[in-house]
Image (spheres, grey):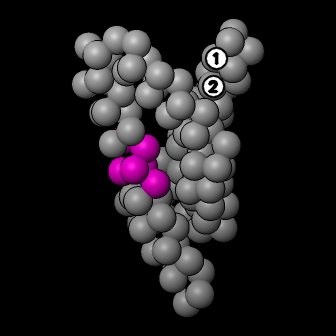
Amino acid sequence: MTHIIDNWRQDHANFSQLLDLLEAQVKRFLEAQTPNYDLMSDILYYMTHYPDIFHHPKEDLVSARAKELDASAGVVVDELMRQHVVLRESGEKLFELIQGILAG
């Protein structure tokens, strides 16, 4: 189990770094500078595919089991599941917008 948790921690650290890069590009846009839209697209593609295929399913299984074992964990688990959906949907929308910019 420690190996799984270590992998999740590394994933979260990687996600954080990618989101920092994305935020820096958004800041460039807000400052009327040209962001690197290709980089933004790559980050968003990764963030809307990798977590839902490899990361969240495992996390969701463990979270659901925690909820079964301790009903008081339900609020936290349900919020985590909700956040996964919001992250995916928001990322997909932003990815589509960036794709539109790149397409002209």
* Nearer-the-camera pick, 26 or 66: 66
Q: Quadrant of residue 79?
A: top left
Residue 62: x and y in percent read 53, 24
Locate the N terminus by quadrant: top right
Element on which disc 2 rests: helix
Secondary structure under tag 1 reads helix
Label of residue 8 in the image: 2
Question: Which residue is found at the position 53% from the left and 31% from the top?
Answer: 61
Q: From which residue to which does the magenta span run?
A: 83-88
> Which amino acid does the dot numbered 2 rest on?
Trp
33 above or below 19? below
In the rendered image, which residue does mark 1 sit on?
A: 5
Q: Return the x and y of residue 74 as percentages of the image width and height.
A: 29, 23
Q: CA distance from mark 1 to mark 2?
A: 5 Å
Residue at the image point whose x is 62% and y is 38% from the top: 55
On the image, the x and y values in percent for residue 85 come to 39, 50
Going by the numbered disc 1, the residue's amino acid type is Ile
